[in-house]
Image: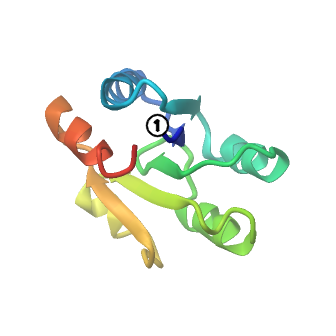
Amino acid sequence: MTLKTCLLVSDDPDDHQGFSEASNEISKGAVVLIILDSQKAIEFLKNTAQHFDFIFLDLSMHGIQINNFLEILRGEPRLRSIEIILYGDETELLKVEDAHGVTFFSKDYEYSELRDFLKEFI
């Protein structure tokens, strides 16, 4: 079994619970780290040696500067290979200036939809 690591950047406790449960249900070897703030997530990513297979980023999070976040990730050679999944509603996705290379997941989801979506990554 290949160990998959994910960084969940969200300030929503319901998302934390659903995401953790779905990840664990799919694979007991999945590692999920949750960071509540996008700026702290960037600082963590820049300063850690930990590799992440994907980042699940909440577009409705308070204070998020999504375009800055994506620009920083794309500008760091070590980080640009990480799969990025943005989730939110359609209007939040319109705020993303360059959605090239990112995947979108609607925040209006049922648990089973989240679990099925995560199977592609975990």
Q: Nearer the viewer, residue 95 or 41?
A: 41
The quarter of the picture where the C terminus appears is top left
Residue 19: percent from the left, percent from the top? Answer: 37, 30
Q: Is residue 44 visible?
A: yes
Q: Is residue 9 left or right of residue 74?
A: left
Q: Position of residue 18 (x, y in %)?
A: 32, 25
Instruction: Name the residue: 47% across, 77% down.
Output: 97
Residue wearing tag 1: 1
Number of marks in the image?
Answer: 1
Looking at the rendered structure, the kind of residue marked 1 is Met
Q: Name which quarter of the figure residue 100 lies in.
A: bottom left
Q: Position of residue 1 (x, y in %)?
A: 46, 37
**Would residue 110 be visible to someone looking at this image?**
no
**Residue at position x 49%, y 37% in the image:** 10
Q: Residue at image x 31%, y 31%?
A: 26
Against 9, residue 91 (above or below) is: below
Q: Position of residue 56 (x, y in %)?
A: 46, 47
Q: Is residue 100 left or right of residue 46?
A: left
In the foreground, 110 or 68: 110
Q: Is residue 59 above or below residue 61?
A: below
Q: Helix, strand or loop at disc 1? A: loop
Question: Where is 119 relative to 20, above or below?
Answer: below
Task: Tell me the residue at 31%/52% (across/down).
Answer: 120
